[in-house]
Amino acid sequence: MLKKYLPFLLSFFLFVQVKGQSYPTPAEGTYTVENFTFENGEKLPLMNLHYYTIGTPRKGSDGKVMNAVLIMHGTTASAAGFLGKQFAGQLFGPGQLLDATKYFIILPDAIGHGKSSRPSDSLHMRFPAYTYNDMVTAEHRLLTKHLGVDHLRLILGTSMGAMHAWVWGYAYPKFMDALMPLACQPAPIVGRNRMMRKMAIDMIKMDPAWQDGEYKSQPVLGLTGALSSFFFMNSSPLQLQSSASTRESADSLVVRMRRGSLASLDANDVIYALEASRYYNPSPFLSQIKVPVFAINSADDEINPAELGVMEKEIKKVKNGRYILLPITDKTVGHGTNSLPAVWGDYLKELLEISEKH
């Protein structure tokens, strides 16, 4: 159970790359945007937007692309996290729900993430203070100006990517046929979620090794403190009780996760990624979303606690919206359930069927 569960304990950070996939080989590319202007007025002379595509675009009788699917990743993660067995292996293969011989799959690295332009490249804390709106604007430009995609069959997002899906829904309401946000809420990030982000940022900045972002090596103490908050918000008590059932296995798991996360994270990138959500608030605009929406959370998600009742309130504003709360089972893994199509795939199938008739 430990080996199976480990990749999802820190869904913000970890992914498993699996060779010998059954779906077409992804194509990798980078689109360089000149003089990208952020919503606060800051500019970046050259901004790289990295992405993967799988499959081939096809146009319908109206001349628009009819089979494109946009899938967006979570905070501090990257598009590469979708290429593993638990996600791509469940969706992109022959006969599967998003069969890449039929669909054109687009997997972008958001601003500040993966191989797209990031604070850690060179600017450090002088990098423009991007927001979710900036990230969605960049994704739209990547699709329309570079990939030639003028319509999306589906937008699917996990965690941060799910929040981007809500923004897409009201910013470009005619651009897609359906939305599937997984593990988020269409409301401002406040309460414990915001407090976790604030505390993590403060922990990094309080580390003397951070040096106002000009560190020569990663501020390990600050990052380690931040990781503790992320871990408990992302994990599932039920799964951990089974996966770390002895003192020795629990301690070993902590060491392995810490080592893996510290090896892959940059402190400045983490600060920017956590702060990018500061102005996120789709709530006043939800009535502008016209396409079918299946918003899916899991009952063991501590980042989006079901007991707050936020989704029940907000989904009423979405004309064709449906809220699905997955019950806790031996297959859900807390917040990381967003990356397990084996758990929510039946709802994706239903959404594709409904939106085809819409």
Image (cartoon, rainbow, N blue to C red):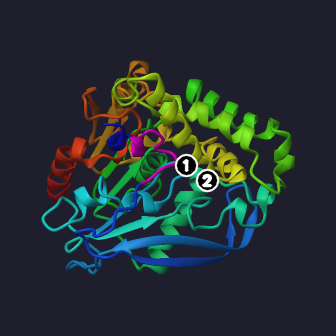
Answer with the quarter of the image where residue 57 lies. bottom left
Report if the CB atoms under discs 2 and 1 are less than 8 Å apart. yes
State whether residue 275 appears in this view.
yes
Q: What residue type is labelled 1?
A: Gly
Task: Name the residue at 33% across, 60% down.
Answer: 176
**Which residue is tagged 2?**
263
Residue 11 lies in the magenta-colored region: yes
**Which residue is tagged 1?**
260
Q: Nearer the viewer, residue 345 or 223?
A: 223
In which quadrant of the rendered image does the N terminus lie?
top left
Q: Which amino acid does label 2 sit on?
A: Ala
- Furthest residue toward front: 248
Residue 343 lies in the magenta-colored region: no
The percent position of residue 37, horizontal first and vertical second, equals 69, 66
Task: Name the residue at 22% across, 69% down.
Answer: 22
The percent position of residue 355, horizontal first and vertical second, equals 20, 54
